[in-house]
Image: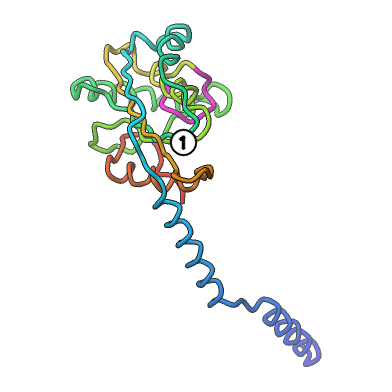
């Protein structure tokens, strides 16, 4: 490589370095302000029990029956954090066995065609099936988990693989309420959801990605 080419490359590197120089102290300072703002928003939030409803497996085999029970859930405009739990430890063990049998076959099916998009299987020893949150349509999300909606949304889809097992699912929902009139942002809800998730270690689902 000639000296002229080397000098040219050196000049290009110098210009690039100067252009890309970043004020890291300012980045840290801005990050601190951002974190303090989040802490301030969370300090003005209350999480309260919203509703608790149980479904027997016979009640979510078809859309019509599910709708009758889902309609009993009160209307709500605030974000919700919810927990799904099987009420019998013995039934839970059998339910997981049904899932493992189905999951092995489901993985072999074509994605976006006949495969059901199931929630991640965490293989924990918890008695909690799932922890999630909803900022829009909670009732539709529950239908996804029970299995009466489509197959594309990642959910439990219980009735698609529970092999007609006789069991009950309890759904506990908690309302995220802000003292101010501002809308609670999604990422704030996810921070709160993470705390539920870490405490309960659900068998299915992913920890909210923050």
- The residue labelled by disc 1 is 79
Q: Which residues, given as a range, are shown in magenta?
A: 149-157
Residue furthest front in the image: 180
Q: How is the image coloured?
A: rainbow
Which secondary structure dominates the residues rendered in magenta? loop
In this rendering, would 162 be left or right of 71?
Answer: left
Residue lying at 55% horizontally and 71% vertically, measured from the top left: 27
Q: Position of residue 197 (x, y in %)?
A: 33, 42
Locate residue 127: give its quadrant: top left
Is the residue 20 above or below the residue 65 in the image?
Answer: below
Residue 61 x %, y %: 40, 10
**Res. 120 in view:** no
Q: Nearer the viewer, residue 96 or 68?
A: 68
Q: Residue at x 52, y 22 (%)?
A: 151
Q: Is residue 32 above or below residue 15?
A: above
| Side (left or right) of 36 relative to 111 | left
> Which of the two residues, 71 or 193, is positioned nearer the viewer here?
71
């Amino acid at each position: 490589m000639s000296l002229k080419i080397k000098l040219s490359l050196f000049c290009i590197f110098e210009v690039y370095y100067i252009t890309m120089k970043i004020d890291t102290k300012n980045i840290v300072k801005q990050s601190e302000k951002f974190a303090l703002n989040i802490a301030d928003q969370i300090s003005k939030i209350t999480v309260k029990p919203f509703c608790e409803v149980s479904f027997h497996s016979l009640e979510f085999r078809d859309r019509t029956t599910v709708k009758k029970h889902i309609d009993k859930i009160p209307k709500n405009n605030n974000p919700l954090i919810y927990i799904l739990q099987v009420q019998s430890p013995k039934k839970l063990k059998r339910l997981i066995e049904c899932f493992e049998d189905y999951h092995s076959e489901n993985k072999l099916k074509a994605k976006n065609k006949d495969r059901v998009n199931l929630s991640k299987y965490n293989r924990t020893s918890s008695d909690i099936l799932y922890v999630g949150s909803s900022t829009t349509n909670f009732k539709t999300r529950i239908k996804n988990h029970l299995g009466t909606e489509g197959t594309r949304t990642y959910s439990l889809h219980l009735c698609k693989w529970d092999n007609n097992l006789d069991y009950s699912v309890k759904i506990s929902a908690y309302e995220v309420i802000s003292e101010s009139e501002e809308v609670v942002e999604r990422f704030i809800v996810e921070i709160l959801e993470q705390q539920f998730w870490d405490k309960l270690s659900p068998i299915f689902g992913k920890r909210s990605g923050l």
